[in-house]
């Protein structure tokens, strides 16, 4: 009934994967095989599931990938040594450390040990800085996924009022930066914001990434709004759901991303795109 309102991550990612596979084929014809190395420390079940998905995506696009699984007891020095080895390995184009890392390891130090030219997550200080001033860099995968979905749906953000709910360094802040660079007018709301609903009711586009199931409800948006839902939660019944209450929002929106089957798929696609971009940069 509402199919025309759904921005399908499956559809967008399938389209993007086709383009990625073409780029990989062109690189292989020149003797370059894109490769992603994923490091996972410990045995967090969710992290292991995410990593399996990333390797599956790589295989679909003919990107090599290897999994470096380290025990929970791995020291920071040992982890940094692994990263340094991969930094020097010319066959590796992308390095990803699956987060979170164990508490005894400094996440910031680990991320910034990755060579910026292989930082396909886009988390190093250099890539974040370049993104903020609009220079070429690796853009964080989830924020770029939000932008991709808006573009694929034909939504021009120029001059639009956008409310971003959530100010994390992984999603909220970078997506606000990307949309500002595309001439949207962006308001960031967070846990200390007063009267969030007053702001969201004025928004043409709402991007929500706060990790609270069903936080954004239909009475908080205006007719015809667009919702990009980054949240992945489980409701009381154990069912996967987003930060937006899909059922109460669907009648009012012009477009909305589903959970599951939405932004998460684009996060994985952009990791592939960044890995291929890194391999292409080596060729230049």
Image (tube, rainbow, N blue to C red):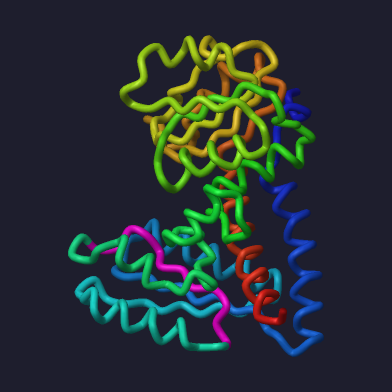
**In this orientation, does residue 237 appear?**
no
Q: Pinpoint residue 174: horizontal percent, then vertical percent.
A: 50, 44
Q: Pinpoint residue 53: horizontal percent, then vertical percent.
A: 54, 63
Q: Quadrant of residue 79?
A: bottom left
The quarter of the image holding the N terminus is top right
Residue at left 53%, top 56%?
Answer: 130
**Is 53 situated above or below 223?**
below
**Is 126 situated above or below 161?**
below
Query: Magenta includes 253?
Result: no
Q: Which residues are magenta?
A: 91-102
Residue at left 61%, top 42%?
Answer: 146
Residue at left 57%, top 60%?
Answer: 138
**Left or right position of 109 against 97:** left
**In this orientation, does residue 157 appear?**
yes
Q: Pinpoint residue 155: horizontal percent, then vertical percent.
A: 75, 31
Magenta segment, prevailing SS (helix, strand or loop): loop
In this view of the protein, which residue sits in the foreground, 143 or 262? 143
**Is 173 situated above or below 185?**
below
Q: Pinpoint residue 257: horizontal percent, then vertical percent.
A: 63, 34
């Amino acid at each position: 009934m509402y199919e025309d309102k759904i921005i399908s991550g499956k559809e967008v990612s399938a389209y993007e994967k086709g383009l990625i596979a073409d780029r990989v084929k062109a690189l292989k014809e020149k003797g370059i095989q894109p490769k992603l190395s994923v490091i996972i420390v410990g045995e967090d079940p969710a992290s292991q599931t995410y990593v399996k998905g990333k390797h599956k995506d790589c295989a679909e696009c003919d990107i090599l990938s290897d999994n470096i699984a380290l025990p929970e007891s791995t020291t920071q020095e040992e982890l940094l040594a692994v990263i340094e080895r991969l930094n020097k390995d010319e066959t590796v184009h992308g390095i990803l450390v699956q987060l979170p890392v164990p508490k005894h390891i400094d996440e910031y130090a680990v991320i910034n040990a990755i060579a910026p030219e292989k930082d396909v997550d886009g988390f190093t200080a250099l890539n974040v800085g370049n993104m903020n001033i609009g220079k070429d860099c690796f853009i964080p995968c989830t924020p770029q996924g939000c932008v991709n979905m808006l573009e694929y749906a034909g939504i021009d953000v120029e001059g639009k009022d956008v409310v971003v709910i959530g100010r994390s360094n992984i999603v909220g802040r970078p997506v606000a930066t990307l949309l500002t660079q595309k001439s949207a007018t962006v308001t960031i709301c967070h846990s200390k914001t007063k009267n969030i609903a007053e702001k969201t009711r004025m928004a043409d586009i709402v991007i929500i990434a706060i990790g609270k199931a069903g936080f954004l409800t239909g009475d908080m948006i205006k007719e015809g709004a667009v919702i990009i839902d980054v949240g992945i939660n489980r409701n009381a019944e154990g069912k996967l759901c987003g930060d937006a209450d899909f059922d109460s929002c669907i009648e009012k929106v012009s477009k909305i991303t589903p959970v599951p089957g939405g932004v998460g798929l684009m996060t994985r696609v952009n990791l592939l795109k960044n890995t291929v971009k890194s391999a292409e940069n080596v060729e230049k």
